Image (cartoon, helix red, strand yellow):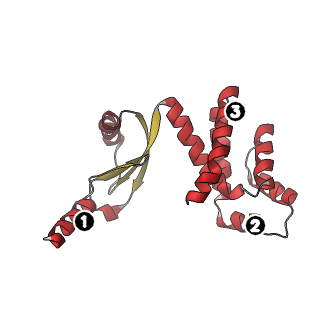
Amino acid sequence: MAELSTIARPYAEALYAAARDKNTVAQWSSVLSELAQISSNEDVREVMADPRLSKTQRKDLLLGLVKNTLPADASNFLDLLVENDRVITLPEIAEQFEDLKNRHEGSAIAKIVTAFELSETQVQELLTGLEKKFGVKLKPEITVDNSIIGGVRVTVGDQVLDTSVQAQLTRLRDTLATQ
């Protein structure tokens, strides 16, 4: 959703700049990941949109769902999001924060979809080739989806490398349909 990403961007950028200045990027990454997971739950979203709850009740509810005690800065950040009715943007803020972190580290996330489970050796070989192709250090997120039949589909940022059998069959079908 483009609107959420537009709303989340200034929060993520400000938060990343502050975290980098205080050398707490890893801590914030962990906190944001947990908050994003909580706020992406459908029941939590529903409660956060309930007009019968005060902003204090909403914040208390979110804090009650967090496993660890939040640092004061994170609690203040949560206050800001609750006050501005931006809790639903937490997953997008977390994603953009991670993108900024990766960009600063010179790395990127590689979302790899395979038809079958890959061994550690296969993953490392694949990453070595992909890192040469994309020119950055990659952090793999691997998903198994047997609907691609065989091969892999890799997404790094907005670039997609699709060597799956499913994609090849689709290209073949399209070629035959145009002739």
Q: Position of residue 8 (x, y in %)?
A: 64, 50
Categorize mark 1 by other alpha carbons within 10 Å: few (<14), some (14-19), many (20+): few
User: To which quarter of the image does residue 156 belong?
Assistant: top left
Reading the image, the residue beneath label 1 is 170
* 7 relative to 129 in the view: left or right: right
Residue 109 visible to an observer of this rendering = yes
Report how far apart the C-alphas of labels 2 and 1 lie in the structure.
43 Å
Residue at horizontal 64 percent and vertical 33 percent from the top:
25
Residue 41: horizontal and vertical position, in percent?
Answer: 65, 62
Label 2 CA crowd tier, 10 Å (few <14, some 14–19, many 20+): few
Q: Secondary structure at mark 1?
A: helix
Q: Earlier in the sequence, mark 1 or mark 3?
A: 3
* Classed neighbour count for the residue bearing mark 3: other residues with Cα under 10 Å, few (<14), some (14–19), many (≥20): some
Q: Amino acid at mark 2?
A: Val
User: Disc 3 designates what residue?
Assistant: 18
Instruction: Look at the numbered disc 3 and give the secondary structure of its residue.
Output: helix
Q: Are marks 2 and 1 in contact (CB under 8 Å)?
A: no
Residue 124 location (% of width, % of height)? 34, 37
Q: Which residue is mark 2?
A: 47
Residue at 66% x, 55% y: name it.
89
What numbered label is drawn on residue 82?
none
